[in-house]
Image (cartoon, coloured by chain):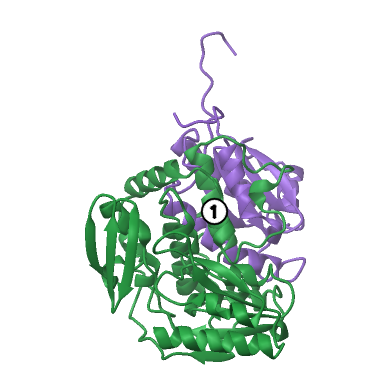
Amino acid sequence: MNSIIDDIRAAARQLLADGKVDVVIGYEKGSLPLKSTPCFVRSPQDADKLIWDETCENNLATYAAQTAGKKAIIAKGCDSRALMVLLQENQLVRDDLYIIGVSCPGVIDKNKIEAETGEIIEATITDGKVSVKGIACDKEYNFADVKDATCQTCRYPNPVIVDLKIGGSVEVPQSDFADVIALENKSDAERKAYFKEQMSKCIRCYACRNACPMCYCQECFVDCNAPKWLTGGVDSAENLLFQTGRALHLAGRCVECGACSRACPQGVDIRALSRKVNKDVKEMYNHESGISEDIKPALNVYSADDPEEFLVKE
Amino acid sequence: MIMGETKPYEPKIAAFLCNWCSYAGADLAGVGRFQYPATIRTIRVPCSGRINPLYILKAMANGADGVLVSGCHPGDCHYMSGNYVARRKFALIDSLLKHVGLEEGRVNFSWVSAAEGVRFAEVVKGVTERVAALGPNTGVFKVDGGGTDE
């Protein structure tokens, strides 16, 4: 890991010194243990703030479109897919973007650890082991056991679009939609109950939307007053409308970075919805978002023989 | 109605019809006097491609017992490809709504052309039967208006 950090810092320093970019978007150490925070480096001497480890969980593509000027960006596999979709959707200019690709072994699910140890006071990560000093107890974990759920099903840990690749590649794990299929195989009543339970946790803080690189609408439908899609109350049916509406807006665009579920303070299983849509998009239209510049977004194109099973039976 | 007699349950169905085909099909059913149940509330949209998934969700949230979405047959779109694009969207909406536990038959999709007045009446009859069999909307999207659960 250390050599990767050194290479990232060196690359950032060089890019800023040469004036090739105005800002390098990366990660710096956060104020809490096992948390990093996005960081915007604008001068070569600040490049040493940059870090790279298993806590670098934000999807930095979210910030790319919001940052003016020429920018370099540290991109994991999912970040690079998000950048690709944003480029396809004309939210970014390729010439203003310098992508520093880093292969990602996955990020830590801090909530999973804190569920056992209580609030984390101190933590260190060395050689695939996470040692945690918590309020309730101290514990050592294998990184693989506390890897975020999204990263466990990740199919693109290596960046798909780079200007500079740092470090080696990560082996691509085999993964299918086992979690979605398990839910699909349950009865309608069980699924209904599952989503009702999940949605009753949602407080509609919109952290999921804000963390999402694909949620860049100038005015989100949840903020719209005319028509008023959502009222102000807390109602699990309305929460479901919000989450379903959002999942459908992301159809054929979601890059499965899991930023939404990691941002969620309530632990809502947001991915249960987006993964289902992703699975449908893959099965019906053989499309995965953000993996190639040449492939058009699934909902922007059509074919004469698209499936029609949804039509009412007469 | 005689006092004490209960009115048979009649579902309310929000029908999103494309201007060029299904709306004209509904018109033809009217002109031709083909009878169909007065359960639908027609909302005319310029094209089935105009239909935002939120229209369907919001109709359910506001208490519609069912939704019917209808446009031109694929290949016949007034705007060439609107319904092709819509078709991809509809397939995903249909699948996701069933996944989250909305009863099958609440939200219905069909293609009805401007020449199919008889068929339009048949579709509405069929959809009304399906929705009526499910009963009033107590579904996952129905907002009770109290602003809180239960």
Quadrant of the snapshot with the N terminus of chain A: bottom left
**Crowd band around label 1 with a 10 angstrom C-alpha radius: few (<14), some (14–19), many (20+):** some
Residue type pointed to by label 1: Ala
Colour of chain B, in one word, is: purple
Who is closer to the viewer here, A156 or A96? A96
Report x, y in % for residue A239: 51, 44
Q: Nearer the viewer, residue B126 or A293?
A: A293
**Residue at the image position 54 percent from the left and 37 percent from the top:** B65
Q: Is residue B83 visible?
A: yes
- The location of residue A190, given as percent across then percent down, is 32, 47
User: Considering depth in this image, is A101 or A120 the residue closer to the camera?
Assistant: A120
Say whether residue A112 is left or right of residue A82.
left
Horizontal arrangement in the rendering, residue B18 relative to residue B67 (left or right): right
Chain under callout 1: A
Q: Give me the chain that's green.
A: A
- Residue at 48% in and 57% down: A263
Q: Position of residue A252 (x, y in %)?
A: 55, 70
Q: Judge by depth and name the residue closer to the eye, A187 or A6.
A: A6
Residue A289 visible within the image: no
Secondary structure under tag 1 reads helix
In the rendered image, the residue lying farthest to the top is B3
- Residue holding disc 1: A207
What number of labels is visible? 1
User: Residue B22 appears in which quarter of the rendering?
Assistant: bottom right
Q: Is residue A23 above or below residue A11?
A: above
Residue B72 x, y percent position in the rendering: 68, 61
Residue lying farthest front? A45
